[in-house]
Amino acid sequence: MPPAAPDISILMAAHGLRAEIPLAVASVFAHARDAAVELIIASDDGTDYRECLPPDPRLVFAPIGPIASGAPAARNRALALAQGSFVTMLDADDAYEGEAHGLAAALALARARGAAVIPSIIRAPDGTALRHVPGEGVQEMGWREWRKVFASLHLLRPRATAEAFRPFRLIDDVWWDLRGLAQAGGHAPVCDALAYRYQLREGQLTETRTSSFDADYAAALAMLRDDPTHFGAATPEVARILWRWRAMNRWAEGAGAGKPRSLGHYHRHVAAYLARA
């Protein structure tokens, strides 16, 4: 008999991350108790990442070929191979943390509600948590809550309705997850047994190409203006989120102008703003 299809497909794009990817992969399997997962790795630097990882039948490798095609294109190569009923993404320099059954818990919520939010923890290199996104104790995320997080969240969403990632430089995941939230009716439960650890490190694209965020937000808002059908009735809600996040990015950039940029400066500014709100 052929092997059963996995419950969850996890998409992992990798570029220049030979040292980081073993931890990311290990974190997936450490939180996959009671869930059938496949982890699809799409190299974007010509590296055969099999050489960096212990053999595991749950690993799937996209064909090696394109180099520096960008995260959206690499994620799409992984998505094209996905066989799971539900799909999410994890970058190769990040990791999961939480309970051993965390992915199974997220799966149960997604099956019941159409999608589940995997919350994020932004951590400094020393492990300090700069932000919990959303705040600890939040059990449900809708459009209003999404407006206030000012950071990527990751949905576990049905593979059958997951479209290709759009070719944004930095917010392809934001658009993709907002599409998933719209398809789930604008609300999704937050999984309290699993978290996406966004690990800050020197040289990250999000740290070195901050001006690209503003360009991406401008492009996304223009797309919504030119074709309001992208999100159907939820288009105004999505526009509010993108507008607010663009404004926050501009404020953080302006607040740091002419000063030495600390690692994670955006999240530090957002944390300070939310503490005053």
Image (cartoon, rainbow, N blue to C red):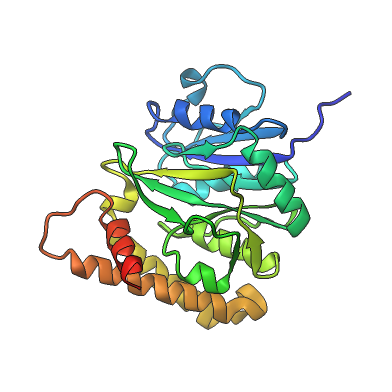
- x, y (%) of residue 1? 89, 23
Pick whichever, 198 or 211, lies toward us: 198
Residue 182 lies left or right of residue 15; in this view the side is right
Residue placed at 62% from the left, 77% from the top?
Answer: 234
- Figure check: 140 above or below 73: below
Can the viewer see residue 255?
A: yes
What is the number of callouts on the image?
Answer: 0
| Quarter of the rendering containing residue 81 | top right
Can the viewer see residue 82?
A: no
Q: Quadrant of the C terminus?
A: bottom left
Which residue is most to the right? 1
- Figure check: 33 above or below 270: above
Residue placed at 29% from the left, 36% from the top?
Answer: 126
- x, y (%) of residue 157? 67, 53
Pick whichever, 269 or 3, lies toward us: 269
| Quarter of the rendering containing residue 79 | top right
- x, y (%) of residue 134? 49, 59
- Figure check: 135 above or below 85: below
Residue 52 lies left or right of residue 263; in this view the side is right
Residue placed at 59% from the left, 17% from the top?
Answer: 55
- x, y (%) of residue 225? 51, 82
- Figure check: 234 above or below 51: below
